[in-house]
Amino acid sequence: MKKAQLFALAAASAITLAGVSCSDGSNSTKASDYDKEIESLLSQMTLDEKIGQLNQRTGVGLTDEMTGAIRAGSVGSLLNEVDPETVNALQREAVENSRLGIPLIFSRDVVHGFKTIYPIPLGQAATWNPALVEEGARVAADEASSVGIRWTFSPMLDVARDSRWGRIAEGFGEDPYLTSVLGEAMIRGYQTDDLSRPNTMAACAKHFAAYGFSENGKDYNSVWMPESRLRDVVLPPFKKAAESGAATFMCSFNEINDVPTNASSYLLRDILRDEWGWNGMMVSDWGSIMQMVPQGHCTDLRHAAAVASKAGVDMDMESYAYIQHLKDLVEKGEVSEKTIDGLVRNVLRLKYRLGLFDNPYVDLDSARRFYTEANLDGARRAAEESAVLLTNNGILPLKENVRRIAVTGPLMDAKHDQNGTWCFDMEKEHTVTALEALTEMYGKDRIIAAPGLTYSRSTDAAGIRRAAAEAAKADVILFFAGEEAVLSGEAHCRADISLPGAQTEMLRALKATGKPVVTVIMAGRALTIPEESKLSDAVLYVFHPGTMGGPAIANLLSGKVNPSGRLPLTMPRMTGQLPLYYAHNNTGRPASGIVLIDSLELEADQTSTGCTSFYLDAGDGPLFPFGHGLSYTTFKYGPVELSATEIAPDGSITASCEITNTGEREGSEVAQLYVRDLVGSMVRPVRELKAFEKITLAPGESRKVSFTLDGADLAYTNAENKKITEPGEFRLWISPDSQAGEAVSFTVK
Ligand code: NOJ
């Protein structure tokens, strides 16, 4: 078989990571890591039983066919069984009635909460608060494991820079560093430092790899990616996940440079296992092995089974390629039993790590641990910290004595939609909407409720007229706009990311009342809202905030809580700017003297715009930059101080800066450290995030933030695919967003 190669230069790749140890899911290395137990079990297994362990099926309850298959040892894992009594009954078939008693693993997409729903991951990223993300994952694991789910398909670590892609909702945004830090926190939350505890879940770092770069933001599309960008932008969060002991990975649907990831032993074996030393379990995505046929890489399912098993896909999710064809492939000598043994070892290791051999059953006495006060409180805090105040002319926080408040717009009372994508187990009756929370806070008499549009795609002109007439009676209008949950997530991409339906018309009508309008946007991506930002007196962007979105929003609007979210992605003015991200290259002709289409003179010269890099209709740059977010207080940054002006490539440098709360109330600020490598053998981005810290300051309080960067933090992948720190001048900022701040310089010598 020809070895799948992703890149022409693959063989030249020479990055070896010293000190990356095989982890047991707890960041520590156990010498044996269950090797003895695994080998002993493996030696007793028939080929059929081995292949059975590699087979993941969707649960269908306790049918005769399913119990028969489990008893025969032909199921390794079950997806989407969430009834603890059924889970135990199925597990009993595996443990007590199959020949070797190997337990099943029950899995589910628990992506931002099981029952208590946290903000979508993109919203959680806006908190820039790893402790809060970890706490949310802990809550999810505790709730889901209480029904027997011990493996979640999360976190999604796909760096994504194109909001057309519906799955941008599921990740942590556009930046590899922010994604690495928050991904690590989420993994820790799911797994804790002891994965064998019954209230943990194995994490799954997905989708390996580069799925977030699907061409033109269309799901499942091909990816074109030079190896240097793969190494510097796509892989860092996965490498961090591997080092943090993520127990499983999932390979992605896409091809990279014409090779399906499910066929890429370069990615799945050479990089992940050999370079990074990871010894977890690799699951395919849903049917992704089978997809190699329509992708044009495999002739049929049998061929796909051979290719994926050799490449290193351990478990087959829903292709049934392994269970149908691996035995024949082994018997005919096309796949070696040694290859199969390698895959089985990884599956068994996961089951040992989860403690399933010792403790296979759900404790029914403590099953269904949902919606505790602490869990709901955590979900509210996360929703509060995920909200980004994009603009505010002083209308927020609402004045205490505001008499009448109009609550309007399609998302004002949308229990389903405020929870966003990927929350199968959400229950509407536990979700608190903005209308409910504001009514509770201000009293029914002060609230005028009129949705206008009843869902985000509606174009009901009469509804708009009615709502505007009602809203005109209020002192302030709160317009809840955005996208329904179903407009983002898997296979829900948009070629136009403006506000859907007649929402902009509705905002114009609300503005025409002459009353101040606060727009609160719930969405699974960055939407283009240039006009809406101008029409509004304030814009609060809350993503899809989850179960406790309503109370969080009421607390933010009323000023009980001060907004502290910061954008985890760049917000474009127009869809046509995508992909748009702050860490772009400068080009040889960076934008200057922008001439917009309406000011072009008739029959002007071809060179009249100055020939720099911008659009005639969108100009250049974002509507709001990565890292942006306002507060009800203000912060002042002092000058950046460096511990040195010169460092060796293997040295380190400390940068610090004093930040003062110059306003009149307590608030949290996210200090963001960016660098630019001014001249490189490969040109470097204008800025790259290297560190951040969220701090809370009382009015008038100052605090010094300090960050230490090693030479390795300044390294990048060069044309020979070597990670190097090149000598030369660097710029460094500590700033409130990716565009602000004064740079200081230092040199690597
Ligand atoms: C397909 C999705 O791509 C993946 O993220 C998910 O975990 C699986 N389906 C299982 O539902």
Image: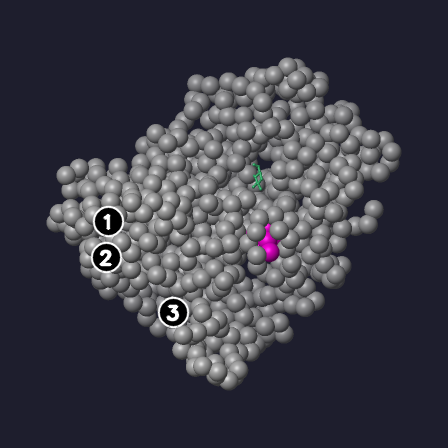
Magenta region, residue range: 210-215
Judging depth in this view, the residue of 204 and 220 nearest the camera is: 220
Judging depth in this view, the residue of 532 and 12 nearest the camera is: 532
- Mark 1 or mark 2, earlier in chain: 1
Judging depth in this view, the residue of 653 and 140 nearest the camera is: 140
Q: Can you tell which quarter of the image residue 526 is in?
A: bottom left
Q: Residue 691's spot in the image, x, y percent?
A: 45, 60
- Mark 3 or mark 1, earlier in chain: 1
Q: Is mark 1 within 8 Å of ligand 1?
A: no
Judging depth in this view, the residue of 274 and 439 nearest the camera is: 439
Check contact, mark 1 vs mark 2: CB within 8 A: yes
- Using the numbered discs, state the Cα–Cα distance from disc 2 to disc 3 in whole angstroms: 34 Å
Q: Residue 583's spot in the image, x, y percent?
A: 51, 65
Q: Would you say the magenta stretch is mainly helix, strand or loop?
A: helix
Comparing labels 2 and 3, the label whose residue is closer to the camera: 2
Residue 213 within the magenta-colored segment of the rendering: yes
- Using the numbered discs, state the Cα–Cα distance from disc 3 to disc 1 in whole angstroms: 38 Å
Q: Residue 319's spot in the image, x, y percent?
A: 68, 34
Is 509 placed above or below 82 here?
below
Q: Is mark 2 within 8 Å of ligand 1?
A: no
Residue under label 1: 468
For the point 85% across and 31% down, the residue is 331
**Could you tell me if residue 563 is visible in this image?**
no
Comparing labels 3 and 1, the label whose residue is closer to the camera: 1
Q: Mark 1 belongs to which amino acid?
A: Ala
For the point 23% across and 57% down, the residue is 512
Secondary structure under badge 2? Answer: loop
Residue 96, label in figure: none
Residue 112 within the magenta-colored segment of the rendering: no
Residue under label 3: 740
